[in-house]
Amino acid sequence: MDKTFTLIFLLFLFLFLHLPNAAKSAIGVGIGVGGGGVSIGVGAGNGNDGNNGGSSVPNQNNAYTALQAWKSAITDDPLKILDTWVGPNVCSYKGVFCENSQDGIAESFATTGPVVAGIDLNHANLLGTFVKELSSLSEITLLHLNSNRFSGTVPDSLRELTSLEELDLSNNQFSGPFPNVVLYMPSIIYLDLRFNSFSGSIPEALFNKRLDAIFLNNNQFGGEIPQNLGNSPASVINLANNKLSGEIPVSFGFMSPKLKEILFLNNQLTGCIPQGVGIFTEMEVLDVSFNSLVGHLPDTISCLQEIEVLNLEHNKLSGELSDVVCSLRSLMNLTVAYNFFSGISQQCSRLFNVGFDFSDNCIPGRNMQRPPPECSVIPGGSLNCLRIPTPKPLVCGSLASNLRSSFP
């Protein structure tokens, strides 16, 4: 046995001995010497002749059973999408996407074959319900069902979808309480439940999840916004068009600085705008319109230098509209209509001529304001909004630490 063969043999033996047992059993090894050459062969085991790595058949069978069960629970398919859901080759089904699964070293020589990695049935207009069998799609990372007619509740069995990263159930007919099964999905980063009929309270645990986008708007969620709202690392949160009440949590001012958009509009919120709003130096959209917020605007709003849309209309806000608001450099849309603002700075006066809406306030000498009797009593005048003293001029970079040190 020459030195070259000895070196190759020892190298291969070393690698083989350090593989997990599962990998050893999946590998057949043949070593032969002939004509002065060396041949080393690696083949898949499990008695399937190496076709797709040995476990593709169980994967396909599980997916086939699950998807056929779901198909039977869909009672109307006007676009005939499910006509393609025939036979065991689920990867050929319309709206179903497969990938080859590979699980680390143990599968380094043989993949487990194609698995269902995603289902995208957006705008399919399907009428039906979920089925518990979907929980067997353990490799799925994406489930998009926007704009269908699915109804009922989300089954608890879907907590088995431990790989799921994106869940979009928007624009359907789902009902019942918040689907708590979402809280048990360890990989989820995108949640879209908007335009359904979910009701009840929003669970506190939602804002402890590692979600980047939370869309709960246009449902019937009620009660107060959980006080741990500020724990969420999300960049986009939409709570609009629900029945939420109480105050915006103080923790809102201590959310992740990557927050870009947050919408509270058209709820039943009361109290003040938290002073911590100024921490969001990268925020682009803030909409608190159509609530019952009161008090003066916090000076910290001046730190929102990336804000493009600031909608404060249809509240009970008062005080003077100062340069704090009207000098924001990126502001493209400012709406403060239907409040009780009683003064306006010179900078804000210039904005009257560029399409920003200041109507139905109490600003003297301006057109389209409230009649004087409505301005004689300012709503919430006795409310003391919590305002922590901040340096003047305000140093936005140190705002977060100043505010945080003021709370236990």
Image: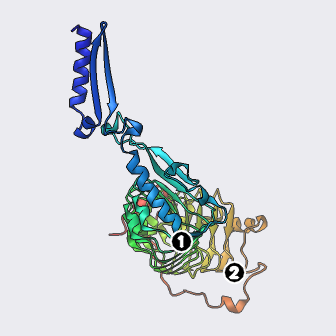
Element under disc 1: loop
Is 13 placed above or below 114 here?
A: above
Q: How many marks?
A: 2
Image-quadrant location for residue 303: bottom right
Residue 41, x across and y down, in percent: 32, 23
Quadrant (top left/top right/bottom left/bottom right) for the C terminus: bottom left
Residue designated by label 2: 361
Q: Is residue 364 left or right of residue 31?
A: right
Q: Residue shown at 47%/50% (left/top)?
A: 117
Which is more N-terminal, label 2 or label 1? 1
Quadrant (top left/top right/bottom left/bottom right) for the N terminus: top left
Q: Residue shown at 71%/74% (left/top)?
A: 358
Q: Nearer the viewer, mark 1 or mark 2?
A: 1
Q: Residue shown at 50%/49% (left/top)?
A: 89
Q: Given the image, on which type of amino acid does mark 2 rest?
A: Asn
Task: Rate crowding at label 1 as few (under 14), some (14 to 19) or many (20 or more) other CA atoms within 10 Å.
Answer: many
Is 103 placed above or below 332 here?
A: above
Residue designated by label 1: 239
Task: Rate crowding at label 2 as few (under 14), some (14 to 19) or many (20 or more) other CA atoms within 10 Å.
Answer: many
Separation of marks 1 and 2 at Cα, in angstroms: 26 Å
Q: Observer-nearest residue: 346 or 188?
A: 188
Q: Is residue 395 visible?
A: no
Residue 22, x across and y down, in percent: 25, 40
Q: Observer-nearest residue: 89 or 254?
A: 89
